[in-house]
Amino acid sequence: MLPRNCPGITVGSMPLDVVRSAFAWLVAGPHPVSVDGSLFDGFPDRRVRVDEVRDLLLRRTCPQSVRDAVWTHLVRLARTEGATWTVACAGIALPALLNVASKLTARFADDPSDIHSSVLTGFLAELATIDLSRPRVMVRLRWAACRAGHAALREALDTPAPSAIAIASASPTAAWGHPDFVLARAVEDGAVSSSEADLIGLTRLEEVPLAAVAEQRGVSYEATKKARQRAERRLVLYLRDDVGPVSRNTSESGVQGCERQPIASPHTSSPDVPAPPSSTTPEVPRCA
């Protein structure tokens, strides 16, 4: 649970604003929360404040191996030492969480608090269970946040809106799916499994080589390739014909489409976290 008794947090604050304020509090004062930089290649050989850790991870030049090493360390601290490091993890991941939430709520007319809360909840739940032996830890944490937020948005869109004249319920505004959210929806409807969605997302969207994923999963390249082909065939059928265990009208239950941010999107978060409120943040980096 994130604290609400530090400066900058008011009643009614958006969940991700609470994270921002709590994270800023961690690095305030003479004894900020920090990690031993000597543990990681390319980090300063000193104690490194967690906001500086965030900025170092967001650099385009930061190797994936270093990102994974840092995130493995952070997740273990969150699991063993509790609240402070859970807040630290959420704060370091905040650029990615804001990116997911802003895309999900871009054309959502109602109060986005529940969706933002679900994005955060999905991230925190995955933090407790994520397999640290596998690479791309933050990518998988972000994917969990995306799935949870998308599920909340879809539930909100599928809830009939009350009509002032009580004649009929208003249908949600039609919208198209960002690739991440299309995969999340396909998992929800049973068109593909979560593991298959991860495989497609990693190799198609995150551009991880198929051979690397096969090696990491302990499966041959050919078997992994065929598994992806089977999953993609089912995904294509699902998108084309709305085939799945639960048939839905995608013209009414989709989500806002957004251009996917390139991996080289600007990463310019500053140490004092001067971002605007999360409900209005237009663009932020995808992940650290």
Image (tube, rainbow, N blue to C red):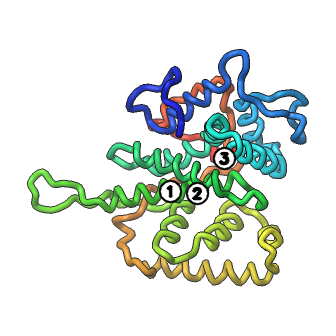
Residue pointed to by mark 1: 148
Determine whether, in the image, residue 32 is placed left or right of residue 254: right
Q: Earlier in the sequence, mark 2 or mark 3?
A: 2
Q: Kindly state the secondary structure of the residue where label 3 is placed.
A: loop
Instruction: Residue type at mark 3: give it.
Output: Cys
**Distance (Cα) linking label 2 and label 3:** 13 Å
Q: Kindly state the secondary structure of the residue where label 1 is placed.
A: helix
Determine whether, in the image, residue 128 is placed left or right of residue 173: right
Q: Taking 52 as reference, is 205 above or below it?
A: below
Which of label 3 and label 1 is nearer to you? 1
Mark 3 surroundings within 10 Å by alpha-carbon count, few (fewer than 14), some (14 through 19), many (20 or more): many
Q: Residue furthest top?
A: 30
Mark 2 surroundings within 10 Å by alpha-carbon count, few (fewer than 14), some (14 through 19), many (20 or more): many
Residue 215 drawn at (x, y percent): 83, 71
Q: Taking 151 as reference, is 266 above or below it?
A: above
Residue 3 drawn at (x, y percent): 52, 32
Determine whether, in the image, residue 210 is placed left or right of residue 268: right
Q: Are marks 2 and 1 in contact (CB under 8 Å)?
A: yes
Instruction: Residue type at mark 1: give it.
Output: Ala
Please name the residue shown 71% across and 67% down the image: 203
* Residue placed most toward the observer, 231 or 36: 36
Q: Is residue 259 visible?
A: no
Residue pointed to by mark 2: 144
Instruction: Residue type at mark 2: give it.
Output: Ala
Q: Quadrant of residue 219?
A: bottom right
Residue pointed to by mark 3: 287
